[in-house]
Amino acid sequence: MVTYQISFPRPGAHLAQVRLEFEAPDQAQTDEPGCTVWMAAWTPGSYLLREYARNVRSFAAEVDGQPVDARKRSKDTWHIPAEPGQRVRVDYTIYAHELSVRTAHHDASHAFLHPAQIFLIPGASTGPFRVEIDLPAGWQAVSLAADPAAEQHGPGRFILELPDLDTLLDTPIEAGELQITRLGEPCGHVRVAVWGEPLPELVLRRLVPVIAQVEATWPGRPYTHYTFIVHAVLGAAGGLEHLHGSVLGVDPERFAPAVRRAAADPTRGPEPGDADDGVLDFLELAAHELFHAWNGKRLRPITLGPFDYHRENYTRELWLVEGLTSYYDRLSVLRSGEMPVQTFLKRLGEDLARLAVVPGRLQQSLSDSSFDAWIKLYRPQDDSPNASVSYYLKGSLVALELDLWLRSQRPEGDGLDAVLAALWRRTSTAVEHWRHSAQELYRFRGFDIDEFIELITAEAGTAPPASLRAAWERPGELDLSNLATVGLHLTEKSAEPGALDLGLVLQDRLGAPWVQHVLAGSPAESAGVAPGDELLAARRGDGPWLRVRTARATRVWDQLRPGEPAELLLSRRERVLTVGLSFTAARGALQVERLAEAPESARNNFRHWARRSWNDT
């Protein structure tokens, strides 16, 4: 068995101390005399080579108790001179101070051990693995293991045994000053472990029906236990899925308006309004990562497991993994009753509006966006909005388009729900037990787009038309005309008279607006405004120069008029210049609304789709 002993002697330095021990393998298992240890370059669910080995600080090796000269052979591999059967010990430290769900983080209050960044792996070892952690006084620990009973807790100790490499790299551990809560029924199999500020009781209570709704979407539950590790501190964000749990980041201050409102009137349920936004964002995030326990971890494109942890693992179906999951995360919160219908429609309209101002939607298909995730989505640059499109954002809207088309073909059917259920049943017939270890699960073949289309065809009774397939195969606009099937329609909210379309995406730097992106086809692009320019001032025609500061930028833009000459004063590489241009008028924002004259059949379809009454607020 390969063993790891982890301790935290220098929390102020953000260093985790790791001792790795193993037996050197037979020479027949290696390419050269001696043995190697290596570290993963990326983590499943986050498609970017993060080169975790860059966080290794000290490194020292012993063989049968004697120091040896270990040499680094590549960016993430070390060679150790050892004969077969000799006992190898490696002592190394990991710098852990990047607060995210896909990197390790350690300070005096906790240690989040993201496995891809923590564990050096001996050569071709596939396990089993034993992890022992020395816990400082007052610390607890939890993991995302399949069964919490596998965790061994003792005074100052936490021990976990994992059967194979894929399971090791899929099982983060959170240690520290934690609040651990087991949710109420019907979600007694779910625990929430929080580092940081405790989650308000209101949030935990509202999480239960959302989890129940996600689980009800599928024919069966593929886990016996599920754990949410939550980082509830300022600056925390994002989520990452694992087989038996997920890691969530949340800013706890965003819960305050909803908690304050509930304290003032405990009888009030969810209702439209900005006060609930922080709670709803968290519920969507939790629903998203939970949904991945089916879509993405067990139902997966062919190339996503077993993994090559050293290099890119390409697929054109990430839009199915992330886009469909993004569609269902919000739909699940709506169906659970925790999101008002008006809020759901408002957020859907905001997604459509965000997509409409991304020129890249006309340049890159969802299929290509999926394939290029390794070099584009996770590595944005100043022309990203012009060259690419998010398979999360557009993918979720294509999932809506697909669901609506299915329901237009068979109003009595269950639309995309039925397709996913059929895919689950088809795939699960090849898997005796969904609670296998990760390595065992990844031996089973994933699905491809042709199989997905085959199930769409079976549910609809006809093959999807070329125009629908174009939604993911080619760049272009979406067709949401089938919103009428569920009694909805698109409208456009007129922009304020005289409002400008700047054609720019600005970012604040110490109170000054800097150009982050210049959108393709805009007057700003034609005038030569460039990413990296600092906006100093603007004027209308021959009028006075008006200083542009982030806090008062809106007041400056209010002085300009669409179609009339204007000038911008810019700083570029410490040189000041002026550019002349004429801004265009701001476009109206897309909205999704209930169709007042919707027939009863459409209203019934809405109830069947949203699990909500047509008249719900």
Image (cartoon, grey):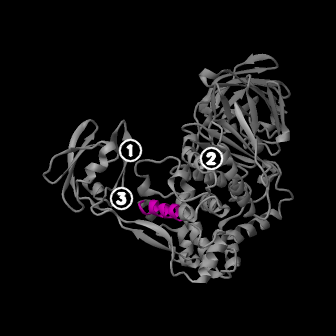
Pair 1/3: label in front: 1
Q: Amino acid at mark 3?
A: Ala
Q: Earlier in the sequence, mark 1 or mark 3?
A: 1
Give the percent coordinates (x, y) of residue 51. Answer: 59, 37
Q: Is residue 614 visible?
A: yes
Give the number of the disc on residue 239. Answer: 2
> What span is in magenta?
345-357
Pair 2/3: label in front: 2
Q: Amino acid at mark 1?
A: Gln
Q: Quadrant of the N terminus?
A: top right
Q: Secondary structure at mark 2?
A: strand
Q: Are marks 2 and 1 in contact (CB under 8 Å)?
A: no
Q: Amino acid at mark 2?
A: Gly
Give the percent coordinates (x, y) of residue 443. Answer: 79, 54
Image quadrant assignment for residue 412: bottom right
Q: Nearer the viewer, residue 119 or 407?
A: 407
